[in-house]
Amino acid sequence: MKIAALDIGGTSIKSGIWEEGNLYGLKEHETRAKAGGAAVMEQAKQALGECGKFDAIGISTAGQVDPWEGYIRFANDNIPGYTGMRIREIMEKEFGVPVAVENDVNAAALGEGRFGAGLGEPDFLCATYGTGVGGAIVVGGEVYRGSACSAGEFGGILIHPQDRVPGDPFSGCYERYASTTALVNKAKELDPGLDNGRKIFARIDEPKVRAVVEQWAEEIAYGLVTLVCIFNPSCIILGGGVMAQPYILERVEEKVRKQIMPSFGGLKLRQATLGNQAGLLGAAWLGSQKLQGFSQKGRNEP
């Protein structure tokens, strides 16, 4: 059984073949996001066309996804014209094989749950920190999606209501303060040359830089404390390239544990282990389930 896996992001489309538990033939193509949803679909077709023969397709993608119908319920302007894109229909018509489509963070959570940091954890949360803040809720080994397939929008947690601006749904919200974008923006106020996470952490021993990172870690903790109180999870998996920094994971955990009630003391905070392959692996697993006739009629089945 060969599954072609795609991970459609704002910058690149990653592809690979999953067979007998192994992911190989990894490639990347430019997304061409600014050219719009139709152009992205053409790029995706090209990536799949280079995968050779396969039995099914699993696709992880940015945007809010209806996995039962395989289309984009909503996408922001990072990919113009992506809202409403019927990805499953397009790809099944093009390649003649079953297609599973899932939101990128949900797919990454499924990947971590079956092959990475979530192994052995039937219930966990996954929070990713990058351009924004993404989230996924896994219950009984399956993604919980909510009534409109949009559960897990952790970036929208309101943590600074005093900064709320009418008409801006993310003003005062978690991702404006806890994303890697937020960290870089604050660091650039200190030194315009600090324009990515790698440069910031290379100078972590400088007191002013450390102070910026410490405040950012505090912002991350605010959102996590809220999630702990709502879900009482046994485990939260933290993803995103910046979480590979041991310093930040240690500081976030320390700040979270100082703010939660003793009854939540069993919480495990773990770094995601699959890196940029998590979404591909989750998509591949979903593709394999689709091929095996896995039912997608239940409202909380993948």
Image: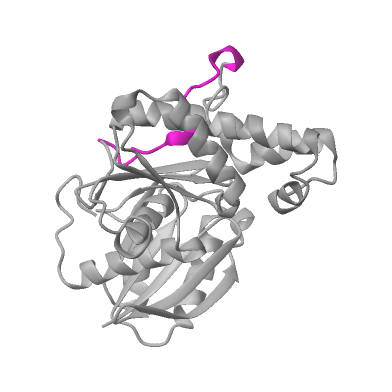
Instruction: Give the x, y percent position of residue 281.
Output: 38, 67
**Quarter assignment of residue 186:** top right
Instruction: Give the x, y percent position of residue 198.
Output: 71, 53
Residue appearing at x 71%, y 48% in the figure: 201
Q: How many marks?
A: 0
> Which part of the image, by quadrant, shows the C terminus?
bottom left
Instruction: Give the x, y percent position of residue 204.
Output: 74, 44
Visible residue check, residue 86: no
Q: Is residue 159 above or below residue 197?
A: above
Is 298 in front, or is 197?
197
Residue appearing at x 50%, y 78% in the figure: 26
Is 72 in front, or is 118?
118
Residue appearing at x 62%, y 57% in the figure: 35
**Quarter assignment of residue 148:** top left
Visible residue check, residue 19: yes
Residue appearing at x 48%, y 73% in the figure: 15
Q: Is residue 141 left or right of residue 36?
A: left
Q: Which residue is at the far top?
A: 162
Residue 151 forms part of the magenta stretch: yes
Give the main secondary structure, helix, strand or loop, of the magenta stretch. Answer: loop
Write down the region rendered in magenta: 147-164
> Which part of the image, by quadrant, shows the N terminus?
bottom left
Q: Is residue 203 above or below residue 207?
A: below
